[in-house]
Structures are given as structure tokens and as C-alpha cells.
Amino acid sequence: MINRFHNHFGKTMFSALLCFLTASESLGQQAADYSVQANIVYRFTKYINWPENMKSGDFVIGVVGDTPLYEELKDFVKNKKAGNQKIVIRKLSPSSSYRCHILFVSDDESGSMKKIVARTTGISTLLVSESERLAEKGGCINFVIVSDHLKLEINKNNIEQRGLSIASELLQLGTIVK
């Protein structure tokens, strides 16, 4: 299955994602470049494989909390698809139903991560966050700033427990955490 990702998207997509992750601009956590994060979240649609039962209808990316990423994602994914699915961005509250493909948990809602993880157990939702150590606390992929560079922490076990698979190219771009 992972080889299918590599064969389908090839080195061009891998190189594009690598360029975004190795950008040399300083990106303090509060001043993170949310347009870059929006692009990376969109690219997750190409490097994560969802179960067949989630490959029809809209491809939903949910955002919990107040973050500029919500507007950036809405602008970035206009007229884009995830496979054959139209991408829809939804603003969700901490008490929402989290029926979505990707759920981004903003820094200001990081304290809700335990509750969000519990409410999405058994659902094939990729949990993405931007606060330290959340990939170790049930999240799947976490944006972190290391030496003024945007990096990814990836918890492969959490991804697989959610019935998702991740392309080896994406694993190579991040730091694997447990």
C-alpha cells in the first residue's frame, strides 16, 4: 500500500513537501507561517491513506480553536480535491462531533487534546496539532519549531491505531515519536 503512494506521487510531491519543511525563514510558534502549514496539511491528503469507507462524500478537514490556519486552509484548498473528494474546511468547537478526515487542534485548544483523542477513538481521523508533545499524547502529527525551522513530529503508532497508513516519504520528513 505504501509503495502505491510512492509510485503515484513520485519524487515531485516529496520534493515539494521537503521544500516547505526546510524553509529557512524564522517561524516562532506564535508567528508561524500558517500558509505553509495549510499547504502541508493539504499534502497530508496525499501521504496518508484512509479506509475505503472514507473515500466517498466530502473530504473534511476540521479546525478546533482560534487560529489563522482556518482561513489559510479555506483559501488554499479552494477548488482542490483529495482524490475524487471535494475538500471542505469546518470550524469546530471543543464539544463538536469530530467526524472528519483531518482534525487540526490549535495551540489554544491543546488542553483539550485528551478529550479530543477520547472522542475520536475508533474513527479514522488524523489528529494534527501545533503544541509541544501532543504527538506523544494521542496526536498523530505535530508541527514544532526546531532551530527556527518548521518540523514534524509523527506518531506512527497513533496513526495506525486509527486505521490509517502513512507513506514512508512523509515518515522520512519527520521525527518519529512514541
Image: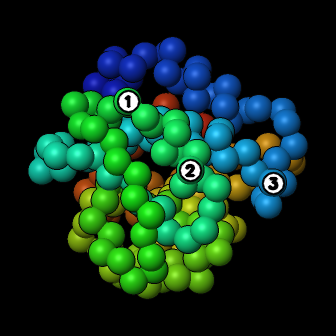
Callout 2: SS: helix
Residue visible at 82% across and 47% down? 27
Badge 2 or badge 1: first in the primary sequence = 2
Tell whether 36 sits left or right of 149.
left
Q: Which residue carries the number 1 mark?
A: 79
Type of the residue with mark 3:
Ala
Callout 3: SS: helix
Tell whether 126 sits left or right of 149.
left
Crowd class of label 1 (few under 14; some 14 to 19; many from 20; radius 10 Å): few
Measure the C-alpha gap from mark 2 to mark 1.
15 Å
Q: Nearer the viewer, mark 3 or mark 2?
A: 2
Q: Which residue carries the number 3 mark?
A: 31
Measure the C-alpha gap from mark 3 to mark 2.
15 Å
Crowd class of label 2 (few under 14; some 14 to 19; many from 20; radius 10 Å): some
Report the quarter where the N terminus lies.
Answer: top left
Residue 85 appears anywhere in the view: yes
Residue visible at 73% across and 45% down? 33
Q: Which residue carries the number 2 mark?
A: 71
